[in-house]
Image (tube, grey):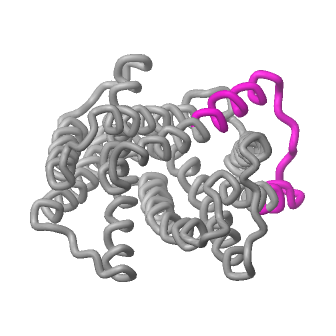
Amino acid sequence: MKLGTIKGILYSSISAIIYGIIPLLTKEVTSADNATLTGSMALRYFVCAIFAYVFAFRGEYSIKVNKKQLSELFFIGAGSAVITNLLLVSSYGYISLGLATVCHFFYPVAVCIIMYLIFQKRVNRYTKSAVICTITALILLIYSYGMSSIIGMGIAVVSGIGWAIHLVAFEKASYHDLPQPVSVFYIMAFSLLFYTIFTVALQTFFLPTGKQVLWITLAGIGLVSAVILTAKGISLIGSTTVAFISLFEPITCMITDLVVYHNVPQGIQWAGYLLMLVSIVFVTLADTQIDATTPHD
């Protein structure tokens, strides 16, 4: 396996684990009586924008982007991320958090479908096996939670498609040529703009306590780090592989939920999470096969 592939898998795995921890930090903020979801998101993205700016423009990168890159960063980069979050949160009004999260994780399959139908990327046998394992895992987990609302599940699945577009854009949009920290800064800044508008319109701003500031700051720094690592991973191994490796995220969520809140998964849920791990193994094998068939200089 090539060094670039190893780095890509490592970056993607670390980012997925960070993504899996962020919901715990978010829950610590939004569970307080004074907190609002849109207000907390605006504050988080304020931290994200500052941290991303410091990271991206400490003298190493240029802030300049062309008009096409700027428009795609606004509409595709930030737009898909914000719409994904809004749809996912909207689904909570119909179904449980756990079921919504499971339906949202249709996105690795969605990335595979988008890359095949739009960009004619061939799917090898290992990736096909990963798709089958992932779909089976989702079916098992959905069954364990119960199909309480088709509408809510549909909204959560669409949120996953939105995130799939977000990932594919890092590989196929015009801004894929930019250094990843620069792209991430603009995405965070535009996301901050969106959430600030929502917060003002809904009048949901709140003053966080000292402890909430800590959680928001950690979540913001974690999110920027995760997105940069995801973008770096996509540049090395492609959005399809990164999307399937992102299945480490729900596994991490399950582990943190088990450790912190002592919520033990049911037997059928263990089977679902195991199949997610198998999917990750299959996409890793797919990349190994690609390395083996790629001519060396």
Magenta residues (range) = 51-80
**Residue 180 location in percent, x, y?**
67, 47
Q: Quadrant of residue 153?
A: top left
Asked if the stretch drawn in magenta spans residue 75, the answer is yes
For the question of whether residue 266 can be seen, the reply is yes
For the question of whether residue 176 can be seen, the reply is no
State the quadrant of the N terminus: bottom left
> Considering only vertical position in the picture, is 33 above or below 89?
below
Q: Quadrant of residue 57?
A: bottom right
**Residue 207 location in percent, x, y?**
78, 68
Out of 69 and 39, give the one closest to the viewer: 39
Q: Residue at x 49, y 61 (%)?
A: 19
Q: Is residue 42 left or right of residue 238?
A: right
Q: Residue at x 30, y 81 (%)?
A: 262
> Considering only vertical position in the picture, is 143 above or below 178?
below
**Residue 100 location in percent, x, y?**
36, 48
Q: Residue furthest left?
A: 267
Q: Quadrant of residue 6?
A: bottom left
